[in-house]
């Protein structure tokens, strides 16, 4: 039989499980994401990464403005709380939210309509596997993975249950905006 208090046993198990409070308690300037209670620290982005984020953010924001749309686009760092639990906190590289009721000063509470992640060396598994599953099950309508090393964009349209891959230099159509195509 195990000896020790319930608090001691909880503390022993707590070392592997984190909450949103733990992310907010990080030292100034340190960033991390939280997926199912597991914390993932984020390295500073490269110049290429930031160039792609800037280009995509500008094209999407310009499109929404030109069309007089109600959606808003946010580049990272921008908090997304996919679930109502305390064990998930994501910072997609780009989030497009069309239901403005989901937004408050802390971020987006619920699934963005469209999420874009730019793959970095340290985020490859997380972007292609963990986040793919989280976004698909969390209600995101469309998920793009932009991979500068492979020079491609993988587009998951969860509503249509499709996946397409586009080489850089080709027009990539958005599934949530019928006449928006982006070329990287």
Image (cartoon, rainbow, N blue to C red):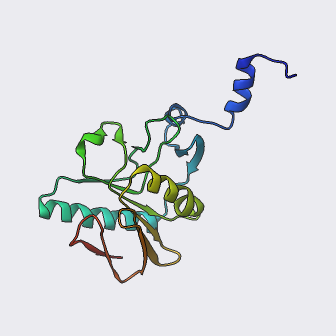
Camera-side residue of 172 and 52? 172
| Residue name at image x 41 percent, y 57 percent | 93
Q: Residue furthest right?
A: 1
Q: Is residue 171 left or right of residue 29?
A: left
Quarter where residue 5 is shown: top right
Report the number of numbered marks. Answer: 0
Camera-side residue of 61 and 48? 61
Quarter where residue 146 is shown: bottom left
| Residue name at image x 22 percent, y 70 percent | 178
Q: Residue furthest top?
A: 5
**Position above or below: 2 against 71:** above
Find residue 83 and report its horizontal and vertical position in percent: 44, 41
Find residue 148 and report its horizontal and vertical position in percent: 48, 73
Find residue 171 and report its horizontal and vertical position in percent: 31, 80
**Position above or below: 83 against 66:** above
Q: Quadrant of the N terminus?
A: top right
**Position above or below: 136 against 155:** above
| Residue name at image x 38 percent, y 55 percent | 140
């Amino acid at each position: 039989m195990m000896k020790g208090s319930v608090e001691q046993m909880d503390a022993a198990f707590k070392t592997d499980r984190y909450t949103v409070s733990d992310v907010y308690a990080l030292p100034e300037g340190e960033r991390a994401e939280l997926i199912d209670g597991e914390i993932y620290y984020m390295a500073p982005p490269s110049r290429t990464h930031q160039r792609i984020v800037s280009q995509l953010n500008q094209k999407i924001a310009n499109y929404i403005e030109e069309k007089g749309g109600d959606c808003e686009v946010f580049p990272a760092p921008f908090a997304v709380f996919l679930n109502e639990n305390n064990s998930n906190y994501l910072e997609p590289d780009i989030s497009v939210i069309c239901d403005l009721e989901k937004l408050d000063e802390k971020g987006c509470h619920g699934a963005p309509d469209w999420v874009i992640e730019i793959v970095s060396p340290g985020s490859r598994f997380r972007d292609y596997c963990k986040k793919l599953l989280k976004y698909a099950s969390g209600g995101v309508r469309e998920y793009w993975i932009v991979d500068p090393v492979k020079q491609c964009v993988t587009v998951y349209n969860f509503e249509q249950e499709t996946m397409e891959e586009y080489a850089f230099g080709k027009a990539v159509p958005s599934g949530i905006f019928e006449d928006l195509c982006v070329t990287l």
